[in-house]
Amino acid sequence: MKKIITLVAVVFAFGVSAQSLELVSHDDTVYYDPQIAQLDVQAHIEIKNTSVTDNKYKVKRNGPFDQSCSTNYFCWDLCYLPTDSVSTGNLTVMSSATNNLFSGHILSSGGGLEDCCEIEYTFFNQDDVTDKLDVSVMFCGDVSLSVNEDVYSLFSVFPNPANDFVNIEYTGSKDGAFQLFNVVGQSVFTQTLSAGVQNTSVDVSSLKSGVYFYTLVIDGQVMETKKLIIK
């Protein structure tokens, strides 16, 4: 009898998979101005593969979503539509390596509603769905973060679509930064924007054709996120 029990215990032990995912850092709460309609609010998550093997990971959004988070999407191996709950593709994270390419997004509907909503994202091993990590992010609308609308009117990026160059016009009263990201959230260009009048031409001819996202950052806060097409 003892031998049978031991055998069962060994089989059970081998049937339990070790968890390979570890949370390195994340934006646990993101604040935004709810008075701005279609503002793209984003949160970033960095994970680590603690196992001795290279693993392929996918991501899932866990609904249902509250009203202020009703329109949301995420970027992993690429940016998915708000109707996509699970990534169709994956990203390989090497053994003991970290990955910070994930970003979760909500689109503000405007109206000035002060509210918080939570979205939970699940990172999981494509080859072992029990090997997973749940990470929650809180998105909170706060009208006290309202920025003078003149900031937006004094920041423009053109032409869009762009071919070889894109022009940045900025005449804000504070220093800022222009950041350009590809669809997997990797920063491909950053330009400091000094207070006052600034017109800058950026060479984008070396970038691959496709969809990019650019942001205006002031005082460390993302003021605006929009899409840029490069042909």
Image: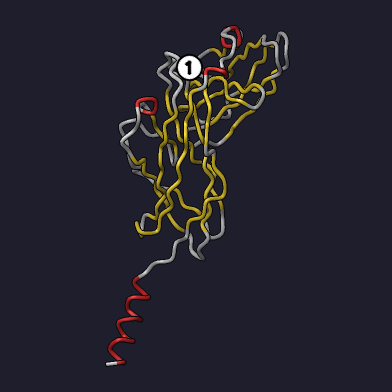
Q: Residues within 10 Å of mark 1 (few under 14, many from 20)?
A: few
| Quarter of the figure that contains the N terminus | bottom left
Lateral position of residue 171 relative to residue 11, left or right: right
Q: State which quadrant residue 166 falls in.
A: top right
- Closer to us: 167 or 95: 95
Question: Where residue 12 sits: x, y (%)?
Answer: 33, 76
Q: Tell me the element at label 1.
A: loop
> Please, is residue 20 above or below residue 208 in the view?
below
- Closest to the observer: 210 or 217? 217
Percent from the top left, x then y, of residue 151?
Answer: 61, 11
Q: Amino acid at mark 1?
A: Pro
Residue visible at 52% across and 42% down? 45
Going by the image, does 38 lie left or right of 153?
A: left
Residue 100 pos. (x, y %): 54, 44
Residue in the image at 52% along x and 22% along y: 142
Q: Nearer the viewer, residue 136 or 199?
A: 136
Which residue has dot 1 on it? 161
In this view, 5 is above or below 122: below
Q: Nearer the viewer, residue 76 or 8?
A: 8
Specify the color scheme.
secondary structure
Q: How many marks?
A: 1
Residue occupying image coordinates x 52% and y 23%: 32
Name which residue lies at 53% across and 60% down.
Answer: 50
